[in-house]
Amino acid sequence: MDKEEPVTGVFLLQSLDSSRQDYGKCPVTREPLTMNDIVSVKTSKIVKPRSLAAASIPGMLGMFQNEWDALMLSNFALEQQLHTTRQELSHALYQMCEEGLLFLV
């Protein structure tokens, strides 16, 4: 593997260091690995807990139903908007044809 080509993998530092100490190689490429080759990734430690509704199957089904309902309402609104836009376009094209500005063949 070319040294210029980065190898990506996300590992816990403790696991990677333990593996490096035991085997001295990268778990992905099997090439020699030093601590200088490792780049630390900083992440937020805050984890938002699941709501009580998401902790059970019936609760999750209720959440999925709510999401589905919201999606269908949004889809219905978009379909109405599309229908209105088509009507406006049709009316505008008809007026342009009457005024002789547009000829349909």
Image (cartoon, helix red, strand yellow):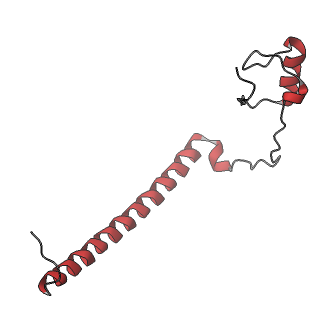
Q: Quadrant of the C terminus?
A: bottom left
Q: Quadrant of residue 88?
A: bottom left
Q: Quadrant of residue 80?
A: bottom left
| Picture layout, residue 40 above or below residue 65 | above
Q: Quadrant of the N terminus?
A: top right
Name the foreground residue: 64 vs 45: 45
* Residue with the most extreme bottom position: 99
| Picture layout, residue 79 above or below residue 84 | above
Where residue 36 appears, x then y in whole percent? 89, 29
Q: Is residue 62 left or right of residue 22?
A: left
Q: Who's the residue at 28% across and 70% down the image? A: 83
Q: Is residue 9 left or right of residue 12?
A: left
Q: How many marks?
A: 0
Name the foreground residue: 88 vs 97: 97
Q: Is residue 30 left or right of residue 33?
A: left
Q: Quadrant of residue 71?
A: bottom left
Name the foreground residue: 28 vs 43: 28
Where residue 65 appears, x then y in whole percent? 48, 51
Q: Who's the residue at 83% across and 46% down the image? A: 45
* Residue with the most extreme left position: 105
Name the foreground residue: 80 vs 4: 4
Where residue 5 appears, x then y in whole percent? 70, 29
Where residue 42 appears, x then y in whole percent? 83, 44
Q: Who's the residue at 83% across and 16% down the image? A: 32
